[in-house]
Image (spheres, grey):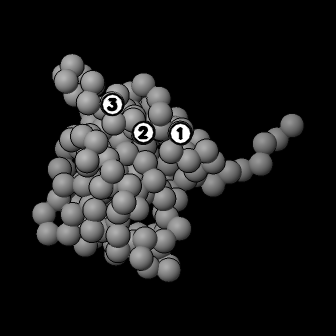
């Protein structure tokens, strides 16, 4: 029996840190994702409009237009509002997680994260939403008490 061909998921990876951008892009490409990149909020908006990815992995802390503002712009545009945005941050404090969600991010991933776990979770995220990111290795979607405990323990 032949399985029907499934188009690869398209992911836009946004990060102003070149090494992080290359690492995530290379791994997701290896795993069969179609990957576009952007190094700024302005570029992320332009690439998202042109490529219409399934998911944007959005670095929150960037100069000029940051990830929060870029997400608000994408979610406010009828053309791009349906694109799923996952915030990627090294500062997964409760206030930042809540700010990302208020900006329109449907999920939050805390750095460092496991690339294999991310690649496995992205297709599930499109079907099940943020709960698909609630797995060890991604630290997403933790309730504020768990985030405070995790940060206090230095994990």
Residue 22, position as x, y percentages in the image: 27, 46
Give the quarter of the figure containing the N terminus: top right
Q: Are marks 1 and 2 in contact (CB under 8 Å)?
A: yes
Percent across and percent down for residue 151 are 22, 28
- Quarter of the picture holding the C terminus: top left
Q: Earlier in the sequence, mark 3 or mark 1?
A: 1
Look at 33% across and 50% down and name the residue there.
Answer: 98
Does residue 123 appear in the picture of this structure? no
Q: Residue at x 21, y 63 (%)?
A: 66
Q: Which residue is mark 2?
A: 141
* Marks 3 and 2 close (CB-CB < 8 Å): no
Q: CA distance from mark 1 to mark 2?
A: 7 Å
Which residue, given by chain and number where applicable, does mark 3 sit on?
A: 145
Label annotation for residue 131: 1
Q: Is residue 15 visible?
A: yes
Q: Categorize mark 1 by other alpha carbons within 10 Å: few (<14), some (14-19), many (20+).
A: some
Q: CA distance from mark 3 to mark 1?
A: 17 Å
Picture layout, residue 37 above or below residue 80: above
Q: Which secondary structure lies at badge 2?
A: loop
Across and down, in percent, residue 69 comes to 27, 68
Residue drawn 26% across the image and 30% down it: 148
Crowd class of label 2 (few under 14; some 14 to 19; many from 20; radius 10 Å)? many
When asked about the image quadrant of residue 39, the answer is bottom left
């Amino acid at each position: 029996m032949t399985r029907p061909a499934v188009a690869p998921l398209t992911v836009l990876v946004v990060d102003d840190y070149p090494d992080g951008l290359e690492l995530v892009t290379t791994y997701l490409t290896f795993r069969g994702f179609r990957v576009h990149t952007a190094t700024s909020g302005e570029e992320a908006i332009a690439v998202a409009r042109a490529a219409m990815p399934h998911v944007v992995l959005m670095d929150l802390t960037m100069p000029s237009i940051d990830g929060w503002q870029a997400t608000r712009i994408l979610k406010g545009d009828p053309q791009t509002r349906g694109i799923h945005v996952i915030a990627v941050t090294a500062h997964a404090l409760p206030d930042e997680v809540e700010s990302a969600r208020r900006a329109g991010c449907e999920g939050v991933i805390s750095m460092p994260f496991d690339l294999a776990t991310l690649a496995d979770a992205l297709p599930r995220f499109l079907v099940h939403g943020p709960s698909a990111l609630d797995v060890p290795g991604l630290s997403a979607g933790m309730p504020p008490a768990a985030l405070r405990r995790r940060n206090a323990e230095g994990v």
